[in-house]
Image (spheres, rainbow, N blue to C red):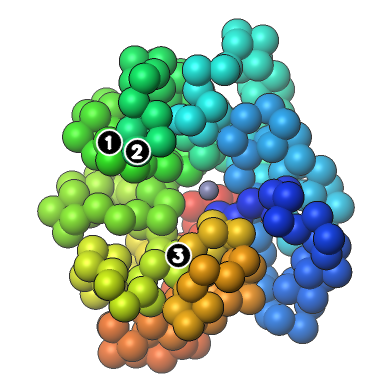
Amino acid sequence: MIDIHAHYDDDAFDDDRDKLLQSLLGEKGVNKIINAGCNIETSEASIRLAEKYENVYAVVGFHPNDAHKMTDDDFEYIKKMLDHPKVLGIGEIGLDYHWDTSHKEIQKEVFRKHLELAVERDLPVVIHERDSIADCLEIVLDYNVKGVFHAFSGSKETAKILLDRGWYISFPGTVTFKNAKHPPENAAFVPEDRILTETDSPYLTAHPFRGKRNDSGYMTYTLEKIAEIRGTDFEHIERITEANAKRLFGF
Ligand SMILES: [Zn+2]
């Protein structure tokens, strides 16, 4: 299993981070983890984790809810971080009008800057989108960039537009939720070569552990659910999602 999106730098892991990561990357069978930055501090923390663990990697950038805090110097520093050998891409970036509606224009501007940088450096991007899909589509479709919509909760119609343009779709524990609508629908039809899996740890824990602190070990429930929806087995989903993650992120 490869967890393409997690936040092990979060306070929720302060008490047992090292023990947990050792066990996840050891006996729990998690192959690789990509830790995502949301600002300078968490991007640096992601790199530190990647330096410590052979199979932890980082993506760096400014999350839409931190976009209004980004200075020109911060953006220059993000560019420098991209030279680190364990930094695989740019993220998490995007638009979020659920938590922040007062900086929409700044969010868009910062999002575009990161996408331009991704094109320039030929790096994949990790997109965060919440309650902002129309603006988000308008922006991403302007760029010839490869990447993934993480924890994608959009409709089948939106997924189709993205898939046509080469995007990957990533599924967290939400696909297992009893009241989930779009994720199970999308899990049924996204082509084999575009599905990715993630946890967004410490959030979005799969059923029956919903509400508990998440970690990459719970991804087994997500893979099992996707396998069930697609009428195949766990091993097959594990194989295709690992191959997809390796193709997109180049590790
Ligand atoms: Zn995240």
Q: Give amino acid for label 3.
A: Pro
Q: Label 2, on which residue?
A: 98
Q: Label 3, on which residue?
A: 172
* Disc 3 from disc 2: Cα separation: 19 Å
Nearer the observer, 64 or 142: 64
Left or right relative to 217: residue 188: left
Q: Can you say which quadrant of the picture contains the C terminus?
A: bottom right
Badge 1 marks a residue whose secondary structure is loop
Nearer the observer, 206 or 242: 206
Q: State the mark number for residue 32.
A: none
- Within 10 Å of disc 2 (Cα), the crowding (few <14, some 14-19, many 20+) is few
If you read the primary sequence from the N terminus, does the residue marked by circle 3 or circle 2 appear first? 2
Q: State the mark number for residue 132.
A: 1
Left or right relative to 222: residue 3: right
Mark 1 vs 2: CB contact within 8 A: yes
If you read the primary sequence from the N terminus, does the residue marked by circle 1 or circle 3 appear first? 1
Check the image and report above or below for 43 versus 104. below
| Residue 103 in view, yes or no | yes
